[in-house]
Image (spheres, helix red, strand yellow):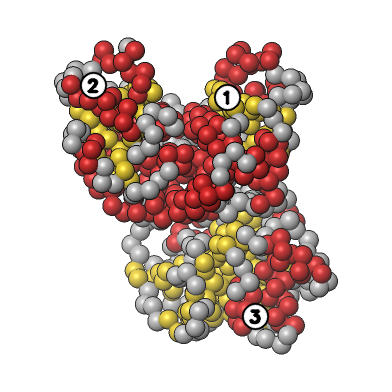
């Protein structure tokens, strides 16, 4: 996730303070850094790809004079991590500078419109169009505030932006739509930032900027207006008593919990992928007779779920394969006709990259899905898609998993449309349901979290859990098992529910906990009989069910309800969330640190 920061000082220099603020935003993950300062009516910009310390050693981020400035740490979503794509971005005359966190969905058409008017856009980013839109309005004679206000009405997507101009050197204009924006207030300065840690040592009075608001910062303080009707907003600062470490987690006790709760937003971002990237990937999948889906761990579970999506929606045969087994199991079968989609949120997993290398050497078509632009997989894949989840700090994959599923669902739906295997009505229905998922996830987190926390207290001493699901829910069960196993260290078993009577059921004894993932889909009837089988042997049944599923409620000991209407083919995206939370709270109950599970690394870069 990008980080933005701006400051207006009554005295002293802004540059060193911006530099220190950007260092405090490093935890958000980034690949480039930059700052812009106004001094004596002139705009100065310094920026480059690389870590803050390296860029500082090269450009000295502290030696720009001036009391007003903005700074940015970039997490690449559009355009590789090169200097030209680093923020701030300026207008043609390099008199104004913009920094941005978010995704401008309609940037391609805005870019064309601006270039047709003669603007020279230097970068590949979506952000740069904002600087030139504002320039257009300034040319019409509007002031900076009105120029920003008019320009952002053209933007579709998410943004938190900050703008400064040498023509009006006494202010910063910022605005928010979805991407976070907070203000810090102190005696002799006012700040804007993506996140509180940026200014926490300097100001403990915080004002949260809401969606659809524009803010003007100057040496008198701050003024907030609603973009809709330009009415003034009076909002008093709140006192924040967080320490810097707490602030990085935005008040959550652990990054994992913060990232679980981020999912409505990150899924929304993933549903804003650029058309051309999805279309290109879809074209490669469409021309393949069958596709291998290769990954490790959680990413493998996403591939397993995707195999149901591609088969049911697009009649495309896909084969989920564990990356570390790929060469042994399929190595010789790979050839120029093979199409292989490699999924890796880090883009650096050694087992996955070894499989990629093998595939490339045998002239296969290598496709990639990752969360990290600039990672190895983006350089070796013929085509890749970035899932735009923002950096995931917790070792356990949570938001990156639901983002992976959201990308794969979009690809399956596009392929279905292209191949005409499913009616338009059904595709439109599923597209609509996919768009609703962020709200469904939000409702689920709001209504079920406390119940899940109580379940972790009830089952905290259990030494082993079964996770069972049928159909696509088997992938969800596997992922729930992995979460519990890797952060609460509880030996757990996941099986297709139908397989449990071919052996695993022998483990069942009174009070043995069995977790069923059972949305109201085509497998509902059969999974009910599996529940009865386990119940008959005294198992304690926890069911993840659709809200109001009275049929299952009657037979289980505990249940967690997912909002109604989630189609089977999309269900893992939401049904996994209770299992993520259960694993998190079980770790807490066992006084473990969910962010740093023993023996594990965030990216497994060893064989
Ligand atoms: C998931 O919680 C684990 N951190 C691990 O299984 C992970 O999914 C696996 O190592 C794959 O990582 P990747 O997606 O970065 O390739």
Residue at 54% across, 22% down: 322
Relative height, residue 28 to residue 228 (above, below): above
Residue 337, image quadrant? top right
The image position of residue 506, as x and y in percent, is 26, 12
Q: Does the residue labelled 2 lie within 8 Å of ligand 1?
A: no
Which of pointers 1 and 2 indicates the residue nearer the eye? Answer: 2
Residue labelled with disc 3: 147
Residue 486 in view (yes/no): no
Residue labelled with disc 1: 319
**Mark 2 nearby-residue class (10 Å; few <14, some 14–19, many ≥20):** some
Q: What element carries label 3?
A: helix
Q: Is mark 2 on a helix, strand or loop?
A: helix
Q: Does the residue labelled 3 lie within 8 Å of ligand 1?
A: no
Residue labelled with disc 2: 533
Question: Which of the numbered marks, if any, corresponds to residue 201?
Answer: none
Lower sequence index among marks 1 and 2: 1
- Asked whether, in this view, residue 555 is left or right of residue 95, the answer is left
**Mark 1 nearby-residue class (10 Å; few <14, some 14–19, many ≥20):** some
Q: Is mark 1 on a helix, strand or loop?
A: strand
Taking depth in this image into account, of 255 and 282 the one nearest to the observer is: 282
Residue at 43% across, 81% down: 233
Q: Tell me whether circle 3 and circle 1 mark residues in contact (CB < 8 Å).
A: no
Q: Tell me whether circle 3 and circle 2 mark residues in contact (CB < 8 Å).
A: no
């Amino acid at each position: 996730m990008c980080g933005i920061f701006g400051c207006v000082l009554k005295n002293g220099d802004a540059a060193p303070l911006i530099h220190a603020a950007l260092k405090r935003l490093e935890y958000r993950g980034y690949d480039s850094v930059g700052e812009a300062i106004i001094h004596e009516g002139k705009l100065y910009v310094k920026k480059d790809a690389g870590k803050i310390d390296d860029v500082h050693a090269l450009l000295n981020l502290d030696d720009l004079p001036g009391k007003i400035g903005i700074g940015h740490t970039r997490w690449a979503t559009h355009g590789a991590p090169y200097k030209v794509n680093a923020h701030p971005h300026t207008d043609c005359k390099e008199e104004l500078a913009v920094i941005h966190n978010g995704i401008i969905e309609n940037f391609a058409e805005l870019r064309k419109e601006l270039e047709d008017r003669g603007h020279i856009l230097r970068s590949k980013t979506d952000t740069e169009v904002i600087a030139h839109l504002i320039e257009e309005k300034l040319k019409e004679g509007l002031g900076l505030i009105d120029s920003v206000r008019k320009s952002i009405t053209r933007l579709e997507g998410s943004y938190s932006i900050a703008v400064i101009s040498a023509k009006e050197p006494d202010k910063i204009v910022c605005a928010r739509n979805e991407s976070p924006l907070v203000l810090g207030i102190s005696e002799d300065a006012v700040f804007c930032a993506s996140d509180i840690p940026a200014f926490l040592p300097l100001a403990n009075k915080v004002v949260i900027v809401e969606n659809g608001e524009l803010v003007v910062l100057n040496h008198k303080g701050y003024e907030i207006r609603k973009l809709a009707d330009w009415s003034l907003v009076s909002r008093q600062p709140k006192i924040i008593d967080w320490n810097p470490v707490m602030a990085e987690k935005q008040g959550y006790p652990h990054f994992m919990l913060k990232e679980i709760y981020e999912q409505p937003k990150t899924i929304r971002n993933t549903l804003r992928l650029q058309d051309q990237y999805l279309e290109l990937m879809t074209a490669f999948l469409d021309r393949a007779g069958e596709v291998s889906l290769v990954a490790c761990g959680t990413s493998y579970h996403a591939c397993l779920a995707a195999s149901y999506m591609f088969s049911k929606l697009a009649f495309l045969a896909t084969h989920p394969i564990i990356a570390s087994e790929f060469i042994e199991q399929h190595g010789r079968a790979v050839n120029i006709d093979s199409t292989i989609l490699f999924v890796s949120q880090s883009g650096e997993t050694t087992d996955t990259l070894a499989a990629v290398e093998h595939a490339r050497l045998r002239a296969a078509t290598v496709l990639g899905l990752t969360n990290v632009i600039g990672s190895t997989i983006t350089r070796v894949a013929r085509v890749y898609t970035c899932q735009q989840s923002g950096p995931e700090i917790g070792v356990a994959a949570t938001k990156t998993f639901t983002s992976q599923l959201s990308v794969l669902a979009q690809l399956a739906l596009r392929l279905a449309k292209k191949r005409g295997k499913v009616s338009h009505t059904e595709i439109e229905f599923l597209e609509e349901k996919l768009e609703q998922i962020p709200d469904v996830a939000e409702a689920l987190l709001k209504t079920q979290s406390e119940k899940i926390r109580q379940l972790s207290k009830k089952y905290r001493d259990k030494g082993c859990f079964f996770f069972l699901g049928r159909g696509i829910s088997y992938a969800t069960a596997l992922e729930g098992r992995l979460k519990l196993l890797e952060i609460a260290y509880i030996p757990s078993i996941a099986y297709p529910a139908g397989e449990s009577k071919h052996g695993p059921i022998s483990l069942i004894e009174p009070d043995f906990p069995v977790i069923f993932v059972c949305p109201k889909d085509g497998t509902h009837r059969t999974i009910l009989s599996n529940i009865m089988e386990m119940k008959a042997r005294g198992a304690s049944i926890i069911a993840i069910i659709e809200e109001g599923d009275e049929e299952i409620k009657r037979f289980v000991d505990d249940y967690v309800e997912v909002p109604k209407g989630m189609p089977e083919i999309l269900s893992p995206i939401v049904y996994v969330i209770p299992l993520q939370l259960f694993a998190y709270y079980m770790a807490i109950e066992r006084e473990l640190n969910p962010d740093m599970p023993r023996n594990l690394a965030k990216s497994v870069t060893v064989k």
